[in-house]
Structures are given as C-alpha cells and as structure tokens.
Image (cartoon, rainbow, N blue to C red):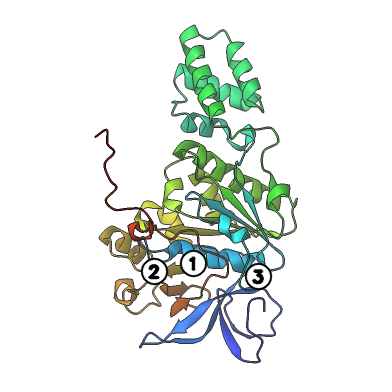
Amino acid sequence: MTGSPASDETEFVIGRGKVVTTDDDAPAGHLGTYRARDGSSGAPLHIDLDGPHAMLIVGKRGYGKSYTLGVVAEALSRARGVAPVIVDPMGVFPTLDQPSDGEPVPAEVVSDPEITTTTLDPRSWCALLDLSPESGAGGLVWQAAQDESTLADMRANVEATEAPAVDKRAAVNHLDLADSWGIFDPDGLDARDLGGGEVTVVDVSGLDAAPMNAVVRGVGEALYRARVDEEIARLPWYMIDEAHTFFQGVGEAALETILTRGRAPGVSLVLATQRPSAVSEVAVSQSDIVVSHRLTSEADLEALDAAQPTYMQTSLAERLPTSPGEVIVIDDATETVHSANVRMRETPHGGDSPNASDVDVDPHPRLSTDD
C-alpha cells in the first residue's frame, strides 16, 4: 500500500470501503493519524488512490485547507497509475518540485498555461466574453467559435461577414481582449502533457478571473475527454484550490461534468475551498469524501449540513475541530466519520502568510535632509 509505514498492522483507508493490511497492493496515500479525544495522535489514516473519487476539502483561512491539498498531491505523485494535476490560483504549489524530506515528489510546474480555443463551445465563448448570444456581437462570436479553431481564424471569420460594422467591431474587440490574456494557442495543453505520473502544477495565479476560468475549463475538458476516448492510461486526479472561484464562470461546466460523470471513465476531482457555500450544491452532494477543517461562517456550515449523511449521528458543527491541522473526515464508502490530524508536508508549504515581524527594516528610518 503506497505511502504506508512498513509493518504488518491493519490500517484504515478512507474511500476504499474496507480495512486493509499494509501489504495491500492497491495505491493509497498517507493522510495523517487518528486524533484522540485528548488531541493526541493515534493510528495512521490513509486515503484511497486506487479508484475515482470526488473529494471536498474545506476550512476557513489559516487552518490548513491548502496544506491538506498539498499532502494529497504529494501522495498522488508517488502513486502508480494516476495522473495528478493541480490548478493553483494563489501561486503556493510550485514548492512541490523542491527537495522533499521523504521520497522524491515528481512535479512539473506550468507557469504560463495555454489552452486551445476549441476547448470552449460557442455558448461558453459568449459567457467568457460577457456577450449575450442573442446580441449582434455575441451571435458573431458564437458562429466564429463554431466554425474555427484559432483566435486568428475566429477574428477573420467575423470580419468576413456582412454583419453591421458596429457588431463586427464589438465582436473583434472582445476577441482581441481574449487574445491579450495570452492563454490561447493551437498547441495548448492537452492530455498528453497532463497524463504523466508526476504532479503537474498549473499556475494560474497571474491571471484574472475570466482567463483563469478558461484554463480550468480547458484542463478539465482535456482530462475528461482523454479518458472517455481512451487516449491516456493513467487515471486523472484533478485538484482545484480556491474552488469557489470557478463556480461562477465557464470553469463550472467542466467541474460539474467530472462530478456527475467522472466515475465511469475514472476521473477524480478534489476541490479545496474556504467557502463551501459558494460552490454548487452538486459539488457538496456528490463528494464521497469530505475533509473539514475549522469553519465558523453560518452560511458555510449550513452548506455542509444540507448534505450531511444520515449515518452521522451528531451535527457537523458539533464535531468540527478548532486548531490548524485538525480535520473531520466524512467517508461515504464506509459510512464513517473520523477525527484526524493531517500529517506534515514533506515538501515546503508555499501558503504561509507573511508577518511584519519577519521584515528586517528599521522601524523608524531617519528623515532625509531634504525633508
């Protein structure tokens, strides 16, 4: 069992539906340890990496949500038969490719991600550019996206029509805006780039919301289609940090497709968010594994309570942890709930907040003689 300590003890694997021994050959990742009532750590706790899952990691800022996502990414990078991809809107996961305290973590960072224009269907192009499909400019963009496969050809398509000049000009201006984002290229990311065993970090931290959503859509569509068409052998694990950002844009369609139809082709989705109330109900209800750090917002607690399983005898709010690194894990496969401590990262965590006390400057610089 990948990620397990060498022993003959029986250990529990979240998401597998059974207790297994450490010589089990199916891949699993070390998530942490059970947490006793006094806060101490107990037996190791693992997460299944063998079959497809929908996983939701939640927690308020500063309590370890992104840290836990990094732990999952580390485990996936060492598991056989999977293709881990993580979308990083905050620029905190490139540290995965730095030296590890344990086994090496194979990782590749894509700093300037690009996708093909055909990733988006005509309706999504209109949504991305904030154009109504019924408007003159929106109709032109719709037709161009349906007929062409590059931005240059889409622009030429619009200019070649006999539409009113004002509509053509508006459509071209919007396509030029999309071009300025620098994310569309005929040779953009595809499943062959993303389907390796190393964890691929897609760094979108330098992008605005619209192009960021387009990349999330593009990568998700590429992974899903590749498995449906049997173009890649490995099972993708698509991990999204700050997932609430992508449930108000064109990225949502790809995420919900994987949530509702990803199990059959073997595509897993891991969503991490500090605002579970801002993701769709589908994201909460379809998650078979929920890892919850501390939450205090009433809206966020209500979002999780609405999907609380019947086998959970007490309310989630009553069981939520209070300290960073502590979690409650809800596992539908075994219909069990676990209190746990997340293990330490083996690669540096890039999400720590800076402190003013760490800045080495004179707190009272002398005024210049010109003042």
Q: Amino acid at mark 1?
A: Thr
Name the side, left or right, on which 79 lies relative to 92. right
Q: Amino acid at mark 2?
A: His
SS assignment at label 3: loop
Q: How many residues crowd around disc 2 within 10 Å: few (fewer than 14), some, or many (20 or more)?
A: many
Q: What residue is shown with label 1?
A: 68
Determine which of the numbered discs, if any, sits on residue 293 in the image.
2
Residue 131 at what x, y percent from top left? 45, 26
Q: Residue at x 38, y 71 (%)?
A: 324
Q: CA distance from mark 2 to mark 3?
A: 24 Å
Residue 245 at what x, y percent from top left? 43, 47
Give the image quarter of residue 71: bottom right
Q: How many marks?
A: 3
Q: Residue at x 54, y 23 (%)?
A: 175
Q: Relative to 11, say whether 311 is above or below.
A: above
Determine which of the numbered discs, if any, sits on residue 50 in the image.
3
